[in-house]
Each structure stands twice: as structure tokens, then as C-alpha cells.
Image: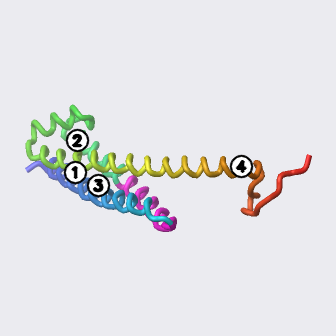
Amino acid sequence: MNPALDSLIECVTTQTAVVREFIAVLENEARTLLDPGSDEQLIDLTQRKSDFAAQLAQLDQQRTELLGTLNFGADQSGIQAACTQFPTLAAPFETLFELARQAAELNQRNGQIIQAFLADNQRAMATLRSLMGDDLYDAKGRITKPSSP
């Protein structure tokens, strides 16, 4: 038995579980983005995504160190070499990377939804400004009248 190898497998398995949870949050975020009036839930989901990102970064660092202990780099070629030398790593890494691709796609799709909403809001504000002038609202959200010349 190789303790570093066992630790690496455990790390990758933990990362996989965290990415699965992250995917669930991203799927929830996608549903929430399409539900009007869900601002508080979106704030909570954004915080959860940040927490997952921090956790995954920590696990990435741990995985890098463990690969280094086994004399492999943390890049794709290093991971492939490790999987070649230790075939028991292949399936856990394959699962992790497939889920990571899925998470990236979901996150990108959610970002596109957000960008579409922002563009719609900007167009609506531009229309209001063209109708009411640049001083439509003050800092407290009250309607103001354009200044007289």
C-alpha cells in the first residue's frame, strides 16, 4: 500500500463529491434565475457557490501536493502519467473531470442568463432615460425632475 496514493484517491473522491454538490447548486441557481422575485435565494446561492469555490481551491492545492509527493506534476500530462503508473487513479480522475466539465457548462449557461437580464435592464433604463432625462431617480430612489437651464 502507498499512503500518498491512498490520500490522492481520497482527495479526488472528495473533490468529486464537492463538485456534485456544486452542480446541484448551479442547477438550483438556473431555476431561481428564471423565477421572478427570488433575490434572497440568489444571494444565498451566490454565497454557497463562493464557499464551494474556496473548498475546491483548497482541494486542488492538496491534490497538487499529493501528486508532487508521488513525483508527478499537477498539469494534464502529470495526471495522465500518474494514471498510467497507478491505474486505480484513472476512474476517479475521469469522473472528477467529467463533472468539472458539466459544472463549467452550467456555470457558463447561468452567466449567459444573467448577462441577458442585465442587457434587458440596461435597455429598459436607456428607454426611461430617453423619456424622462438623465436624472430619473436620485440616490434614494426618488423620482427627480431634470434641472431647469
Q: Nearer the viewer, mark 4 or mark 2?
A: 4
The answer to whether residue 61 is seen in the rendering is: no
Q: Measure the C-alpha gap from mark 4 to mark 3.
A: 44 Å
Q: Are marks 1 and 4 in contact (CB under 8 Å)?
A: no
**In this rendering, is residue 10 above or below 71?**
below
**In this rendering, is residue 36 above or below 57?**
below
Q: Main secondary structure of the magenta part?
A: helix
**Is residue 41 highlighted in magenta?**
yes
Q: What SS does tag 4 mark?
A: helix
Q: Choose the circle earlier in sequence order: 1 or 3.
A: 1
Report the residue marked by disc 3. Answer: 19
Q: Choose the circle earlier in sequence order: 4 or 3.
A: 3
Q: Is residue 82 left or right of residue 122?
A: left
Q: Is residue 15 left or right of residue 29?
A: left
Stretch in magenta? 37-55
Q: Nearer the viewer, residue 13 or 142?
A: 142
The answer to whether residue 101 is seen in the rendering is: yes
Residue 20: x %, y % from top left: 26, 57
Residue 41: x %, y % from top left: 46, 67
Residue 72: x %, y % from top left: 21, 36
Report the residue marked by disc 1. Answer: 12
Of all residues, the one furthest to the right in this rendering is: 149
Hey, what amino acid is under mark 3? Val
The image's mark for residue 67 is: 2
| Among the 4 quarters of the image, the one containing residue 14 | bottom left
Q: Are marks 4 and 3 in contact (CB under 8 Å)?
A: no
Q: Are marks 2 and 3 in contact (CB under 8 Å)?
A: no
Q: Nearer the viewer, residue 138 or 12?
A: 138
Hey, what amino acid is under mark 1? Val
Q: Choose the circle earlier in sequence order: 2 or 3.
A: 3
